[in-house]
Image: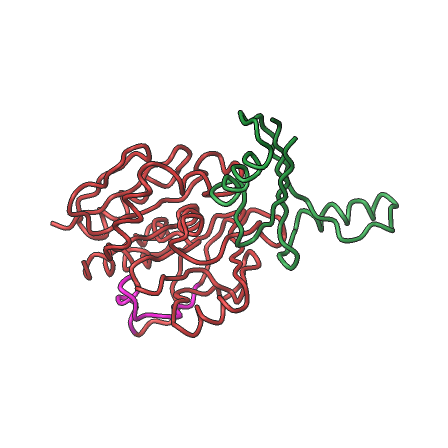
Amino acid sequence: MRAKVHVFLKPGVLDVQGKAVEQALHGLGWGGVEHVRVGRTIEFDLKSADAAAAEAEVKAMCEKLLANTVIESYRVEVA
Amino acid sequence: MTKAAVIVFPGSNCDRDCKVAVERSTGAQVEMVWHGDTTLPSGVDLVVLPGGFSYGDYLRCGAMASLSPIMSDVVAAAERGVATVGICNGFQILCEAGLLPGALLRNEKLKYVCKPIELEVTNAQTRFTAGYKGRRQVSMTVGNGEGNFFADEETLDRLEGEGQVVFRYLENPNGSQRNIAGIINGRGNVLGMMPHPDRAFEAELGSADGATLFQSALASA
């Protein structure tokens, strides 16, 4: 199975990269851009036959290593 | 003779500075401990997690280092009450390991800051800062790109209320909430700080104020 993990800073946590990208887009003329957030995607193959079990395993990985839940939230896709 | 251990992670770059700083400030015997080891030297009185870029700062600063094999024994030592200090990347590792609350974010202005800095000694009644008694201001240096201390409001109130804020910046270099430069755990034996006492332990380095911190830590051992 292929797992995709999306990690973003939580709302309310200052995302300075997002701010910088937003300002750059404004500078290029895209004035309608708002609330840019920069996150990361982590993808990997996982040996598992069962999607629900795989999702639970990936969530455990997020809690342990892939995300810092003090500042970040995550979303898991398994397919 | 008192004994200290400096943990060496792949990408640490202040490990030898910490060794020399602790040796010259205190006369303690300092052992370098590789992150892949599983036990600290026996009878260690002080554990230092040094600055640098452990694991290349990949994923998040300090994230992978916090799960290194040696960290279970570091956590066990901290839980036994052994004095533990994390400096710069070491502070990030302590937060990632859950030994200290909060996290360190990218600096507010996205700039790496490297300069001498003045600190307020917010709490001089800790085992690390007892030597600063009567002094409200000390000089050290900072060198960080992700030193912007973050915790939720409730945690910040608790840290302030319980005297766990140990150092504050007089001029905030990185956007840290409430100008926090260093915090201690509730029990008072785990200190994390972004400024470098290891780069300020002799007058020739611009300040000897960092030496007092290592002396205090080991005097209380």
Observer-nearest of B118 and B48: B48
Q: Quadrant of the N terminus of chain A?
A: top right
The stretch drawn in magenta includes residue B121? yes
The stretch drawn in magenta includes residue B30? no
Please name the color used to draw chain B. red
Q: What residue lies at 25% left-to-right and 48% top-to-bottom? A: B22
> In the image, residue B163 lies at what x, y percent?
38, 71
Observer-nearest of B47 and B24: B47
**B116 left or right, relative to B207:** right
User: Vertically, is B62 above or below B130?
Assistant: above
> In the image, residue B206 lies at what x, y percent?
38, 54
Q: Quadrant of the C terminus of chain A?
A: top right
Q: What residue lies at 58% left-to-right and 28% top-to-bottom? A: A44
Q: How many marks?
A: 0
**B119 left or right, relative to B46:** right
* Residue that extends furthest to the left in the rendered view of this protein: B1
Q: What residue lies at 22% left-to-right and 48% top-to-bottom? A: B24
Magenta residues, as a range? B119-133
> In the image, residue A29 lies at what x, y percent?
88, 45
Question: What secondary structure do most residues of the magenta stretch adopt?
Answer: loop
- Residue B65 picture quarter: top left
Q: What residue lies at 54% left-to-right and 57% top-to-bottom? A: B173
> In the image, residue B185 lies at what x, y percent?
36, 61
Q: How is the image coloured?
A: by chain
User: Vertically, is B70 above or below B152?
Assistant: above
**B118 left or right, relative to B27:** right
Give the chain coloured green.
A
